[in-house]
Amino acid sequence: MKSMNNAAAWKGLEPTLGWMIRRGAEKHPDAEALVVDDKRYTYAQLSDRLNRLANALADLGVRKGDKVALMLFNGNEFVESVFGIAKLGAVTAPLNYRLQQKELEYIINHSDIMVLIYDAEFDPIVKALEAKLPRVKEYIVVGKETSAGRNYEMVLAGSPSQEPEVEVLETDLASLIYTAGTTGLPKGAMLSHRNHLWSCINSMLREGDYMLEKNVIIPIPLFHVAGFQRFLITLFLGGKNVMTRSFDPAKFLGLVQREKTTATLMVPTQITMLTRVPNIDQYDRNSLAAFQFGAAPSGRKLLQEIGSVFPRANSTHCYGITETSATASYLPATEFRKKMGSVGKKGQGYMNIEVRVLNAELQDVKPLEVGEIIIRGPNVMMGYYKDPEATAAAFYEGGWYKTGDMGMYDQDGYLFIVDRKKDMIISGGENIYSPEVENILTSHPKIAEAAVIGVPDELWGEVVRAIVVPKSGQELREQEIIDYCRTKLAGYKCPKSVVLLKALPVSGAGKVLKTVLRAQYGQP
């Protein structure tokens, strides 16, 4: 055999997202990889389609490092796009289609998007934005061809299916996922191929039977890092992802029954919705044995709801954020009932993810002492896109990422989240940051000051309440304020109730005392 150097032998085997899906197609080409409503794709079929997309994008001028945005519902087009883009060494930027046009405009421009792939339902939004997106050169639309974009299926049909020959490294940027910043402007978390793959590996090695995670139904949006990572994990294991374009409780239960799915990842709001499906016992849910959830605290009510919907399921409470590729810590199913509310035990989490809690003196906390959770591992992001200052501020020396989440260990070493990122509200699994909503409120011509807090809600977990001080001589009505916000913000970010005050409580330093506001106005 002719000798060759090790670098040449390694070429093409670098562990990347493209390598992962190619490996799957080679090992089990006829196994089902994806079910979307009534559409089914084997690994070979999925590989053929995503290679066609990759080659089509290359013909459109997409090169390594270029950014491609996805404004797509859950479906095969989203999955194909992620892997097709990855095989070119280009970067996927999933967009939260629930955002307002102004928010989408900022993210698309800030991330230097070259190609936008979107569902036809979003055509009015895309057409309204097109003139404001000077860097976007090509539009590809799923469902039909429009004046703005090429038809997705026609693009695939006109392109070859051979493997793209682009050298991609595990350290290369793979995705750019925007997370709302505490200053109100979204920040783009840069996740490498290595970040995503180590998240897959750690999830596979998590306590429990990983074989259950080879037939997974995904009801959460893929544009969120949790949904994004969830479909990657399943395909990494050679399993089957089942999904619908958007969450419909009855349709979801029908798919669980039809596909005999064994695992899922949901937000608590979705579980509550499932409990309200009429005649739920008509659906066979006994196949589902592994239930994972995050995005909100757990409690006995949630446990009861999980048990009523999925009587055979063991529950795992997961903790992770965008900047950690959705993985950080977890409470295994075997300990869920004993330590409800905890997100894991000290020293017993993911294989190579380190978690610490530091007090104000930057020392590790004692039991029951509250401090900031910091995380280190190969799953932690590369940094924030085009924001070196925010990146530097987000890390301690040694690669420790500052989550901004406050936590504590109990006497047994179990970690509990005692407060989320400062002033953040979580509604239906969506993060809502106070400054963004407050900036909109104070832009109202009749409002002098405003603050927002979260109040408990049976369905959504939390909803936004606005605390507003009118300008002198101005009269304001609750509905007027809510309607104003609806023209400026995504629906889930808008206040559901309003309290009018003459002044906001402030500290000696002039900062609004939200602890006082929560104590006085934080109940439904």
Image (spheres, rainbow, N blue to C red):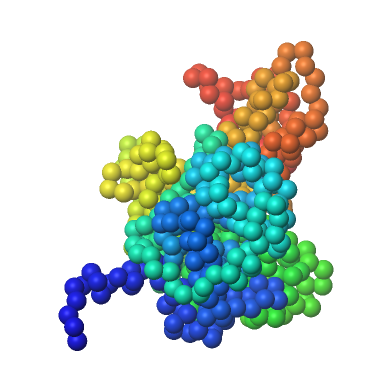
Q: Quadrant of residue 18?
A: bottom left
Residue 178 visible: no
* Above or below: residue 437 compared with residue 13: above
Residue 89 visible: yes
**Residue occupying the point 78% across, 72% down:** 280
The answer to whether 37 appears left or right of 237 in the picture is right
Q: Nearer the viewer, residue 25 or 148?
A: 148
The answer to whether 258 appears left or right of 224 in the picture is right
Q: How many marks?
A: 0
Q: Position of residue 477 (x, y in %)?
A: 81, 27
Q: Nearer the viewer, residue 312 or 176?
A: 176
Pick out the residue farthest to the top.
473
Q: Nearer the viewer, residue 503 or 446?
A: 446
Q: Quadrant of residue 153?
A: bottom right
* Above or below: residue 319 compared with residue 11: above
**Residue occupying the point 32% across, 37% down:** 361
The answer to whether 511 appears left or right of 254 in the picture is left
Q: Nearer the viewer, residue 397 or 231?
A: 231
Q: Position of residue 112 (x, y in %)?
A: 49, 45
**Residue occupying the point 35% across, 53% down:** 376
